[in-house]
Amino acid sequence: MVPLKNLHTFGFDTLAQHLVEVHTKDDLVSVFQGLKTKQFYLLGEGSNSIFLEDFAGTIVLNKLKGIQVHENENEVGLSVGSGESWHDLVEYTLSIGAYGFENLALIPGTVGGAPIQNIGAYGVEIEKFIASVEYYDIHLNSFHILNHQDCHFVYRDSIFKHQLFNKAVITKVNFILPKNNRVEHSYAPLNQLVEPTPIDIFNKVIEVRTEKLPNPKVLGNAGSFFKNPVVTNKVLNEIKMRYTSVPHYKVSHTSVKIPAAWLIDQLGFKGKMYLGVKCHERQPLVLVNIGSGNGRGLLMLARQIKQDVSNAFNIELENEVRLVGKNGVIDL
Ligand code: FAD
Ligand code: EPU
């Protein structure tokens, strides 16, 4: 049995039956030839996965490394092994004067994890810079390239969570950073900066994130537990009748995004705890493991939040985080 405590940022004391590390494409092929129909879970840095209980299968741990840079007059192209650290890549690109990733500083995880849910923060989603994604098709035993439009990127979602879930292992991500990229600072609090450089954005994002989000090395967590819901104007207007100042952001003519943190905050969940799993006092969208937490506590708290939000606001929250049970991913 293999301990999972240090392999996922929520840090539950759970085990997996086996673990294999994948360092090369050849490793990948032989691991999946060996696994055949056996149960597996692909793991990067475990910052969006919570192992609720012991997993009765094999963890396939991604260690595919390597960064290739190719540059022309207009852009910097990067082909990056999916096991590289995302934040290290952000720092590396800034060090070579290639800009665009700065808003996404300090997001934990691997480069291969980034396209799965189209990571986003402070006004930028990674899809903006993804030209294509290389993956290994487990069923077909062959490597393929998916162009940007075929990845079906939207807010916190992509084809890798649906048709290609448990079928594709992302091996490489190909990025393009245009040299004329405009610094994005329309999102609060970056909008307070005057003519910021990409380095100013990088520093500010790190400052804000360090202040707002609990550090998983100190307090186990997986970032935002739920997605921010997109609702119709009708639902918004119903909420406005009771809460005139409900925060919301326009998504289309007929829909808006409401911060899930606000919904959870209104219902008084901040600081509420079940079996060592707590709703964070500063950012209620983040659930934390105070050290002694377990999967049962997490499910109790998350289900209570979901139920109460549904009853109070007629909004169905969706979890952003992947919940892994004995036999793989489960629904909330
Ligand atoms: P894992 O948790 O290891 O895997 C996530 C999912 O992807 C799993 O289903 C796994 O099977 C699958 N997967 C992993 N690697 C591969 C691969 N190579 N091929 C195919 N499938 C794969 N996210 C944001 O978008 N914005 C944020 O601002 C943000 N902030 C965060 C802050 C904190 C403190 C934490 C803990 C998390 C935060 N996250 C954020 C969530 C998380 O960091 C991202 O989702 C990250 O991209 C996950 O990468 P990972 O390697 O850790 O994924
Ligand atoms: N709010 C409250 N009470 C609180 C905290 C926040 O009501 O105690 C409300 C406020 O209205 C605030 C709003 O929630 O303006 C938004 O809060 P915040 O700026 O902290 O952002 P978020 O919506 O909680 C999202 C992403 C984060 C990303 C930040 C910055 C999702 C699910 N989460 O958080 O991503 O880093 O914006 O762009 O979209 C992640 O996905 O794991 C993640 C951390």
Image: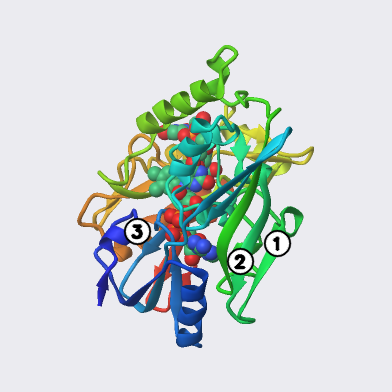
Q: CA distance from mark 2 to mark 1?
A: 8 Å
Q: Is ligand 1 within 8 Å of the beta carbon of the residue shown at mark 2?
A: yes
Q: Percent position (x, y) of residue 217?
A: 28, 46
How did the renderer colour the structure?
rainbow
Mark 1, residues whose alpha carbon is within 10 Å: few (<14), some, or many (≥20)?
few
Residue at 42% in and 46% down: 108
Q: Percent position (x, y) of residue 55?
A: 35, 75
Answer with left or right where residue 262 lies relative to residue 222: right
Task: Give the secondary structure at mark 2.
Answer: strand
Q: Percent position (x, y) of residue 330?
A: 47, 70
Label whose residue precedes the other's in the sequence (3 or 2): 3
Residue 299's label in the rendered image is: none
Mark toward the viewer: 3 or 1: 1
Residue at 49% in and 54% down: 66
Label whose residue precedes the other's in the sequence (2 or 1): 2
Decide which of 135, 25 is in the foreground and name it. Answer: 25
